[in-house]
Amino acid sequence: MTTPEQKTFASVTLTPDEEWTELHAHLPDPSIWPIIIALGISVLLTGIVINLLVILIGLAIFAFGLGGWIYQDIMVSLRQDEHGHH
């Protein structure tokens, strides 16, 4: 049971002398790269049925998507480091 001076937040009871800090979940920035990677995998798997050229095109799309996603992640990390974020 909480007393009038206590507040309950998500089953955590705090007294007035305790400090409440918000918890933030880190979520990555929205990105198109996972969709491009999925497209590359789909084309690659279709190429297994069709021919080697389609496999190579799927592999190229997949590599492009993976490289783009890695590059985006590096750029976001560098931008956050410049601004002092974690």
Image: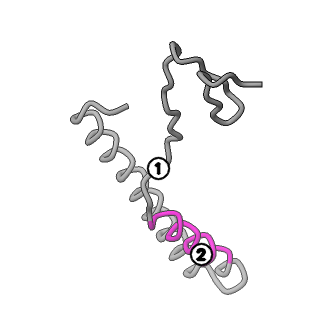
Q: Position of residue 67 (x, y in %)?
A: 41, 56
How many residues crowd around disc 2 within 10 Å: few (fewer than 14), some, or many (20 or more)?
A: many
Residue 50 placement, left or right of 16? right
Residue with the most extreme left position: 82
Residue with the most extreme top position: 17
At 44% from the left and 62% from the top, the residue drawn is 31
Residue 64 placement, left or right of 43? left
Task: Check if residue 54 falls in the magenta segment.
Answer: no
Image mark count? 2
- Above or below, 76 against 59 in this view is above
Q: Any mark on residue 28, and which? A: 1
Spatial separation of the CA atoms under disc 2 and disc 1: 30 Å
Quadrant of image for the N terminus: top right
Task: Check if residue 42 falls in the magenta segment.
Answer: yes
At 53% from the left and 40% from the top, the residue drawn is 25
Q: Amino acid at mark 2?
A: Ile
Considering the whole magenta stretch, tell me its main secondary structure: helix
* Segment colored magenta: 32-45
Residue 15 placement, left or right of 64? right
Given residues 56 and 3, the one toward you in this image is 3
Q: Nearer the viewer, mark 2 or mark 1?
A: 1
Q: Position of residue 29 (x, y in %)?
A: 42, 54
Q: Secondary structure at mark 2?
A: helix
Sequence-wise, the earlier of marks 2 and 1 is 1
Q: Any mark on residue 55, and which? A: 2
Q: Position of residue 16 (x, y in %)?
A: 53, 18
Q: Position of residue 36 (x, y in %)?
A: 49, 70
Q: Amino acid at mark 1?
A: Pro
- Above or below, 53 against 65 in this view is below
At 68% from the left and 75% from the top, the residue drawn is 45
